[in-house]
Amino acid sequence: MNIVLLGPPGAGKGTQAIRISAHFDIPHISTGDIFRRAVAQKTALGLKAKEFMDRGDLVPDEVVIGIVKQRLEEPDCSTGFLLDGFPRTVPQAEALVDALTVGGRALDKVLNIEVDRDELIRRLTGRRTCRGCGKVFHLIFDPPKSSTTCDICGGALWQREDDSEETVINRLKVYEAQTAPLVDFYRAQGLLVAVDGRQPVEVVFSRIDEILHA
Ligand code: AP5
Ligand code: MG
Ligand code: ZN
């Protein structure tokens, strides 16, 4: 099962990806997570990506495409994968087709998680992540017992640098300009399935589960 999760910042791609990946036993590939790890480890990639991420702009295609191509060649992707946050531009989507075609593979479905703008801003500005175990909370929609400590591992909760309201607004603008065209791109190929992302997390997941079993 080769799946792409599409949707604006804050739509719930990461939240659903964890569930899909566990349920269907396919690797979850999040380019955002790959970059955040590289930034934390201060690698050359991290140093390059950080300036774009902090502004809410996209990391250049040539940097992202190479990383994803390499990741898709790893053995755990041979029976399926779930891409979260890639592709994000038409050139990335075209590069993905090429990379998969070489190995006789193709995408099975593209799930487009739809959420309105006001809700996206609420979700992003209230998100908190555990430094210890990576669990993602929301101050209102999935509140930790304490706003500074993880319920599960006791780790410190942090707010992503790009989740300030100012940067969120730029990320939404960048999404409209560069990523939204992929909706038509994938619709034209008959791969797109819309998912109402405004429902509670478990309701969204059951809908995705239904779509992927269909
Ligand atoms: P990335 O990390 O991919 O960020 P994003 O696409 O902006 O999406 P988010 O991770 O912010 O949102 P999400 O949809 O995963 O929502 P989540 O599930 O966490 O990218 C970050 C940056 O990296 C980019 O800006 C760019 O610079 C760079 N980058 C990454 N990929 C790139 C690429 N391919 N090309 C170029 N640059 C790239 O949920 C959000 C919050 O809402 C959480 O608090 C959650 O608890 C809550 N929530 C989730 N679902 C629900 C629900 N159903 N109801 C209520 N609350 C919910
Ligand atoms: Mg995410
Ligand atoms: Zn934790």
Image (tube, helix red, strand yellow):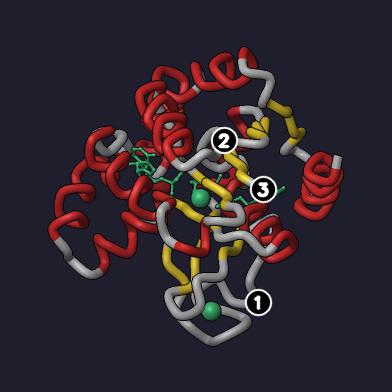
Q: Earlier in the sequence, mark 2 or mark 1?
A: 2
As displayed, is residue 130 above or below residue 139?
A: below
Task: Assign a secondary structure to mark 1.
Answer: loop
Residue type of the residue flagged with mark 3: Met
Question: Mark 1 = which residue?
Answer: 145
Residue 122 rendering spot, x and y as whole percentages: 58, 42
89 to the left or right of 64? right
Q: Earlier in the sequence, mark 3 or mark 2?
A: 3
Pointer 3: residues within 10 angstroms few (<14), some, or many (20+)?
Answer: some
| Residue shown at 61% from the left, 56% from the top | 79
Q: Nearer the viewer, mark 2 or mark 1?
A: 2
Q: Are marks 2 and 1 in contact (CB under 8 Å)?
A: no
Question: Quick one: quadrant of the C terminus?
Answer: top right
Label 3 to label 2: alpha-carbon separation: 9 Å
Q: Nearer the viewer, mark 1 or mark 3?
A: 3
Question: Mark 3 = which residue?
Answer: 1
Question: Mark 2 = which residue?
Answer: 106
Task: Assign a secondary structure to mark 3.
Answer: loop
Residue 189 rendering spot, x and y as whole percentages: 62, 18
Residue type of the residue flagged with mark 2: Ala
